[in-house]
Amino acid sequence: MRHNDLVDDPLRIADEVADALADGRPVVALESTIIAHGMPHPRNVETAFALESLIRSGGAVPATVALVDGTLRVGLFDDDIEQLGSTDEVAKVSLRDVGAVLASGRLGATTVAATIFAAHRAGIRVFATGGIGGVHRGDDHDISADLTALGRFPVAVVCAGAKAVLDLPRTLEALETLGVPVLGWRTEAFPEFWTRGADLPVDARVDGADHAAAVLDTHWSAGLTTGAVLGVPIPTGHEADRAVIDAAITDGLAAAEVAGITGSDITPFLLAHIGDATGGASLDANVALVQENANVATEVAVALATTR
Ligand code: PSU
Ligand code: MN
């Protein structure tokens, strides 16, 4: 610990990622909270490696983000991923936590918010995850900093919408207020994570990677500095049963209340509860959707790299 020293810039970009960025080749960022807090071991680690290899097969370089030994790492070693997925003591790092966790030297998993920030600092424009955080249900004003980060940094987040445990209409209203475009990948409906969605509209539909890249490139070329959400529906066939998921969510929210779970512990608690309540079906769906998102993010990153 170096409390009194001036600290150097803690950003550390892996060589492979830095080389790709310097050459203008496509890079896709990945978060690590989904590994450390979003899925149980060993599915989490298997999924993290699977995402990296899907991105490579699509012709881009993966850059998983985490806080390791006091540095903000963009691009991890396999050992780091193993550790993030198998250690209990990993901090969940959102924007507000970056400084304290870096200063402590603890291992930290980045949320969507902190990953957007790190991707932007590294010069990465495309990031794949499961689902963003948003406005929670109820009136306790729990609003994920994922929305704040989307409003502040020019990174496209490819995701299956927002987790259905949230208040999705309010989440979309908040994104509108922040000036964050919500695009639908070959759909007009905002995806609802474990299901494809049908009830809520996106702002614009895009019909492929070139179309998505054109919209994003134009948004940023026009001078807008906000991020974007590219909502990709879970592949048909992997969709969870809507009624089963809805019942598990209702039950999970009640269980969280009884157990007094609040703040940043809510999302991991709900995901674990819904996984148990659905006999693992929600986890299978989660793995399928995040893989689809990595594939789409790779296509979009490749298309963006060729428009430049
Ligand atoms: N998507 C998933 N699994 C997850 C998350 C998203 O498929 O575990 C995580 C993301 O890291 C997201 C976080 O940023 O949940 C939101 O947490 P909160 O609501 O506390 O901001
Ligand atoms: Mn919160």
Image: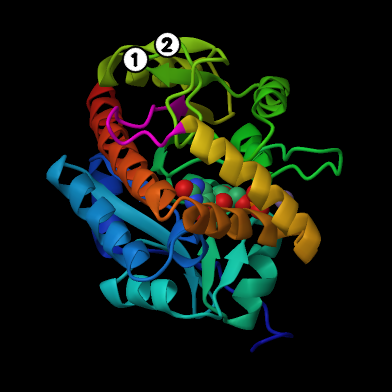
Does the stretch in magenta take in 234?
Answer: yes
| Label 1 residue SS | loop
Q: Say which mark, if any, is on residue 205.
A: 2
Q: Quadrant of the C terminus?
A: top left
As drawn, the residue found furthest toward the right would be 139
User: What secondary structure characterizes most of the magenta part?
Assistant: loop
Q: Is residue 153 visible?
A: no
Front residue of 237 and 91 = 237
* Residue 234 percent location from the top left of the image: 36, 32
Q: Is residue 167 above or below residue 294?
A: above
Q: Quadrant of the N terminus?
A: bottom right
Q: Is residue 307 above or below residue 139?
A: above
Left or right of 37: which side holds 179?
Answer: right
In the rendered structure, find residue 194 and report the number of the disc placed on it: none
Above or below for 212 versus 139 = above
* Residue 45 horizontal/vertical position (percent): 32, 66
Task: Give neighbour class at mark 2: few <14, some 14-19, many 20+ (Cα, 10 Å).
Answer: many
* SS under mark 2: strand
Front residue of 241/182: it is 241
